[in-house]
Image: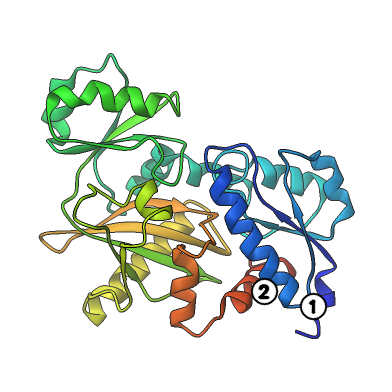
């Protein structure tokens, strides 16, 4: 790419101090190498080991920080303050997207279908929770990504342990109705939904958990996803509305389920999705002809056009 000089000096923000640090280091390294191959003057920048004040030496930032500190509006706020253009969603959309409960509240208020939930603690009355959500259900930390701290609860006696596991990662924990059916992810890029990917974890895992995402090689990714053309368009439109409703922009991912009756349910939004060899965004982009390098440059180019935040 001969005109890569228009980007100036680019900080690839990676690592950080969240529970997803290791994944972010992998994602960031992949993005950095892609930008360098494309002729971009890019450097790795880990805010865990360097002061964010040093970002004044860069012209723009490619954010590949997953989890807290990078995906929740904090680094976006720093970059806004320093007047440095950056990739992806802005401060408010990032903060909302990182909070699974706030995201659900906005979707519910926008008449978008999302699984019923309630906030729980170790003192919650399990009978009340089960009466409302049924069994099985899933326990999730509200502010973590990558399925960290999540557990499927099939029996009442497993509830307390699942809450304790989630509480180790977050002060706020939610129980969500378990949706039996097919899981899909929809990648959004520059205001468009890319071909949908169906996720099929191996039979011995309860759901698409951290291990399935990053450590196993036996997860099936379906493109085409197996939906009819009409259903795929319907879910793409739903994902786009869900993405915009929380104020997300530029690029990201929406995870959703289709229950056994064919209804779609929105699970969550990812405003800084993984960019590793296992990751879903490169797979979806590849289906419409983007190489990994082209994808990274296209995301970075959002900082020139205002597509980002």
Residue 10 appears in which quarter of the rendering?
A: bottom right
Compared to 190, does 75 lie above or below? above
Report which residue position mark 1 lands on: 4
Mark 1 residue element: helix
Left or right: 6 in relation to 260? right
Q: Residues within 10 Å of mark 1 (few under 14, many from 20)?
A: some
Residue 138, position in %: x, y? 25, 38
Compared to 125, does 22 lie above or below? below
The circle on residue 267 is none
Report which residue position mark 2 lands on: 297
Whether tag 2 and tag 1 are in contact, CB under 8 A, the answer is yes
Left or right: 43 in relation to 180? right
Query: Who's the residue at 13% across and 21% down the image?
Result: 127
Confirm whether residue 78 shows in the render. yes
Mark 2 residue element: helix
Q: Quadrant of the C terminus?
A: bottom right
Residue 137, position in %: x, y? 20, 37
- Residue nearest the observer in this picture, 230 or 1: 1
Left or right: 52 in relation to 156? right
Confirm whether residue 89 shows in the render. no
Residue 142, position in %: x, y? 41, 35
């Amino acid at each position: 790419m001969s005109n890569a000089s228009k980007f100036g000096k680019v900080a690839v923000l990676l690592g950080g101090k969240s529970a997803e640090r290791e994944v972010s280091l992998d994602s960031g390294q992949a993005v950095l190498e892609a930008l360098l191959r494309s002729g971009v003057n890019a450097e790795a920048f880990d805010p865990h080991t360097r002061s964010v004040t040093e970002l004044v030496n860069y012209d723009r930032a490619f954010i590949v920080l997953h989890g807290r500190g990078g995906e929740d509006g904090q680094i976006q706020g720093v970059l806004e303050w320093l007047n440095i253009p950056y990739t992806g969603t802005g401060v408010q959309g990032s903060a909302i997207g990182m909070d699974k409960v706030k995201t659900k509240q906005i979707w519910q208020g926008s008449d978008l279908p999302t699984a019923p939930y309630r906030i729980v603690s170790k003192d919650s009355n399990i009978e009340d929770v089960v009466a409302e959500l049924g069994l099985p259900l899933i326990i999730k930390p509200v502010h973590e990504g990558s399925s960290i701290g999540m557990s499927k609860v099939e029996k009442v006696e497993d509830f307390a342990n699942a809450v304790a596991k989630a509480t180790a990662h977050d002060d706020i924990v939610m129980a969500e109705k378990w949706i039996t059916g097919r899981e899909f992810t929809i990648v959004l890029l520059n205001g468009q939904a890319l071909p949908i990917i169906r996720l099929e974890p191996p039979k011995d895992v309860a759901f698409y958990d951290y291990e399935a995402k990053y450590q196993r090689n036996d997860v099936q990714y379906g493109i085409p996803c197996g939906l009819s053309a009409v259903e795929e368009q319907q879910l793409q439109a739903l994902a786009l509305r869900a993405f915009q409703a929380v104020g997300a922009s530029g690029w990201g991912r929406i995870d959703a389920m289709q229950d056994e009756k064919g209804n779609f349910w929105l699970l969550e939004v990812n405003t800084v999705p993984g960019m590793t060899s296992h990751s879903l965004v490169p797979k979806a982009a590849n289906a419409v002809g983007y190489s990994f390098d082209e994808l990274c440059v296209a995301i970075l180019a959002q900082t020139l056009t205002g597509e980002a935040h």
